[in-house]
Every structure is written in structure tokens, then in C-alpha cells.
Image (cartoon, rainbow, N blue to C red):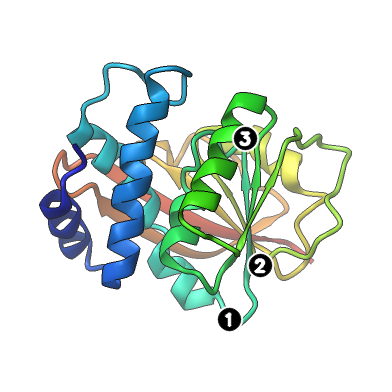
Amino acid sequence: MCDYKQLLTGVNRLGIRLEEHAVERLLIYCSELRKWNRKINLIARDTSAAEIMEKHFLDSLILLPLLDRHGSEGAHLLDVGSGAGFPGLVLAAVRPELCVTLLEPRQKRTAFLRHIARTLKLTNVSVREERLEPSKALPEAFTFITSRAVAAPDIFLPLIEQTAGPETLVILMLAAEERQTWNVDRWQTVDSLKCSLPFSGHPRLLTALRKQP
């Protein structure tokens, strides 16, 4: 069972405020994830409910301060390689005013993403079953582009470069110790956020970049 108290304790430790209906959506999402994960490989099978909440849901929510600082009305987020919906679908569940596009090439996972979007009645979510290629630019204008563990930054940035516009904020989700292991030539750091997961204490670093003019 996904723990209501753990979720509330976690967001409070992260300094994040969620409306009650947002909390309810995340608990339903978590329960459905555990149910589907018995049949298809969405996350590691031996992940406990407590680990799911921290490593996946709370780890996705750490983006909210950056989105709130740099977003505006009509903001649109692209989550590349969304998998089971982390971080994009979690963010859509708690910020219904944020338009979210989930890009995921595997059919079983897109079926799950669409199921969750329907179950939670999320009209702000678009699920696309496709893989982004370095030479291919998506036609939409995105406010934010992010991804969780799809590729190292020196691979991910060239992958999304054609899709990122001059005002697009690309948010890299990293473990803090990764900070010096990659090169961001042609990209300008706009903002960053360093924090720790609320129960394990595992460090996280978010780095927000824009293309150099």
C-alpha cells in the first residue's frame, strides 16, 4: 500500500506544498503502478512501496521549485523517455495548469501512461509513442525539457538540441557527484537546485540550461 503519511512527510521535508487532491492523485497513481508492475516491467520488481514513493514520486517532485520559478501561464514540459511517468506524469498530476508531453517508445509503457492519465482525468497530458532522434526536432514550442536517467548529459543535450528553442529551459536531473563529469559547451547554466531525498538522504542536483545564442 502506498503510504499517505510518508508522502506528506516527504513533501514537507522538501519544502513543497501540495493540494489535497494532488496528494490523492499521487496515491492512486502509486497503487496502479504497483498493480501493473506485477505484469509488466515498469520499475524493478523488488522495489518496496516506501522506495517507490521516495525514489520515483518524491524524486520527481523536486523539480517543482524550478518549474514554479521559471514557468508561466501556458507552460509546456517535454519528458523524454518517460518510462513509467517519472518525472513528467507526476508533475502533471500535481500541476494541472502545466501542459505535459510524455515521449516513450515502448508500447507497454505508453499503455500504462495513458491508463494513468485517464484514471486521474488528466486533460493536460499527451502521450506519444516514439523515440527522439538527434536529427529530428519536435514541432511544438516547449518551456521545459527534462528526462530522468535516459542518457548522460553529453548524450542527452545533443539529442534534444534541435527541439529546444532559444527560451527553452533544459533541466538535467543528476546525482550531485555527477556535476564535474560532463561538458556543457554551447549551453548556459541559468539556475540550479541541490537537495537530498527526504528519507535516504541521497543527494540530487538539478541544473537548468539554455542554448547559447
Give the mark nearer the N terminus: 1 vs 2. 1
Could you tell me if the residues under marks 1 and 2 are in contact, i.e. CB atoms within 8 Å? Answer: yes
User: What residue is at 86 percent from the left and 57 percent from the top?
Assistant: 139
Cα–Cα span, label 3 and label 1? 28 Å
> Which of the 4 quarters of the picture holds residue 25?
bottom left
Question: Residue 20: horizontal and vertical position, in percent?
Answer: 26, 70
Q: Is residue 203 above or below residue 108?
A: below
What element does badge 3 sit on? helix
Q: Is residue 162 above or below residue 148?
A: below
Give the mark nearer the N terminus: 3 vs 2. 3
Q: Is residue 212 above or below residue 134?
A: below
> Residue 110 bears which disc, if any?
3
Residue 17 in view, yes or no: no
Tell me if 114 is positioned left or right of 16 in this view.
right
Say what amino acid the circle numbered 1 marks: Ser
Tell me if 164 is positioned left or right of 123 in this view.
right
Cα–Cα span, label 1 and label 2? 9 Å
> Which of the 4 quarters of the picture holds residue 76?
bottom right
Question: Residue 151: horizontal and vertical position, in percent?
Answer: 59, 31
10 Å crowding of disc 1: few (<14), some (14-19), many (20+): few
Tell me if 123 is positioned left or right of 211 in this view.
left
Front position in the image: 188 or 137: 137
> Which of the 4 quarters of the picture holds residue 16?
bottom left
Q: Quadrant of the N terminus?
A: top left
What element does badge 1 sit on? loop
Question: What residue is pinned by disc 2?
Answer: 143
Question: What residue is pinned by disc 1?
Answer: 72
Say what amino acid the circle numbered 3 marks: Thr
Cα–Cα span, label 3 and label 2? 23 Å
Q: Is residue 53 above or below residue 207?
A: above
